[in-house]
Image (cartoon, grey):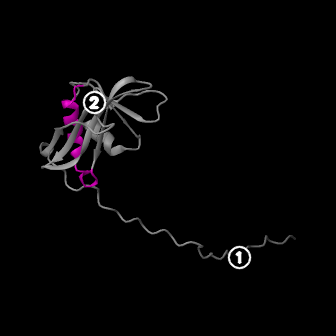
């Protein structure tokens, strides 16, 4: 007659070496209530160094109800794979981000620019700028082997 298999004693629960993670506190969304796009104005002026000051360059201050909220500028650059092209950039002050100011500024600057087509170069992780640009009529220009996201807008595509 053989012996029945030996039964192991239940394992003791170990005390965790690290505390359990705390739940993340939801932060309020950046920006707050959206701004009426009609309150966003562009004021054209000469651009500072490397911001629309070169040949074919354009520069605008972004104004919201008389207060400067940022800047938009276009530089004509010569970079692979596009070659020579007009590249638009926008910079908004922190308190004016997340309020729809960028959407209105992209749309108004693209309409006011003398360049056709216009390109945007941005990080693929910059979702807020991408959404604002797409709302202004920019579309992805799928180019192989490019690390950055490149968006393109032609006149009449708004």
Give the mark toward the camera: 2 or 1.
2
* Residue 111 relative to residue 20: left or right: left
Rendered position, 22 above or below 33? below
Residue 123 coordinates in the image, percent (x, y): 41, 40
- Give the number of callouts: 2
Based on the picture, tell me whether residue 140 belongs to the magenta stretch: no
Q: Write down the quadrant of residue 87 in the picture.
A: top left
Q: Residues within 10 Å of mark 2 (few under 14, many from 20)?
A: many
Who's the residue at 46% across and 31% down the image? 146
User: In the structure shown, which secondary structural element does the residue marked by tag 1 occupy?
Assistant: loop
Q: Position of residue 15 (x, y in %)?
A: 60, 76
Residue shown at 71%/76% (left/top)?
9
| Magenta stretch prevailing secondary structure | helix
Neighbourhood count class around disc 1 (C-alpha, 10 Å): few under 14, some 14–19, many 20 upward: few
> Where is the C terminus found, in terms of image quarters?
top left
Identify whether 117 is placed above or below 124.
above
Q: Which residue is mark 1?
A: 9
Front residue (pair 87, 125):
87
The label shown at residue 57 is 2
Instruction: Specify whether residue 97 is painted magenta.
Output: yes
Which element type, helix, strand or loop, lies under badge 2?
A: loop
Distance between mark 2 and mark 1 Cα atoms:
79 Å
Residue bounds of the magenta highlight: 93-114
Residues 46 and 33: in front is 46
The quadrant the N terminus occupies is: bottom right
The answer to whether the residues at label 2 and label 1 have Cβ atoms under 8 Å apart is: no
Residue 67: give x, y in percent of width and height. 16, 51
Precedes in sequence: disc 2 or disc 1: 1
Residue at the image position 24 percent from the left and 36 percent from the top: 59
């Amino acid at each position: 007659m053989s012996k029945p298999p030996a039964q192991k004693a239940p394992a003791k629960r170990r005390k965790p070496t690290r505390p359990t993670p705390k739940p993340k506190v939801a932060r309020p969304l950046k920006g707050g209530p959206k701004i009426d796009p009609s309150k966003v104005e562009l004021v054209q002026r000469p651009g500072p160094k490397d911001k629309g000051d070169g040949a074919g360059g354009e520069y605008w201050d972004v104004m919201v109800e008389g207060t400067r909220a940022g800047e938009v500028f276009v530089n004509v650059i010569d970079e692979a794979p596009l070659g020579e092209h007009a590249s638009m950039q926008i910079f908004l002050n922190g308190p004016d981000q997340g309020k729809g100011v960028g959407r209105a500024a992209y749309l108004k600057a693209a309409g006011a620019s003398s360049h056709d087509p216009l390109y945007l170069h941005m990080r693929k992780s910059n979702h807020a700028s991408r959404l604002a640009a797409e709302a202004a009529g920019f579309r992805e220009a799928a180019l192989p082997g490019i690390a950055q996201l490149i968006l393109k807008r032609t006149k009449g595509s708004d």
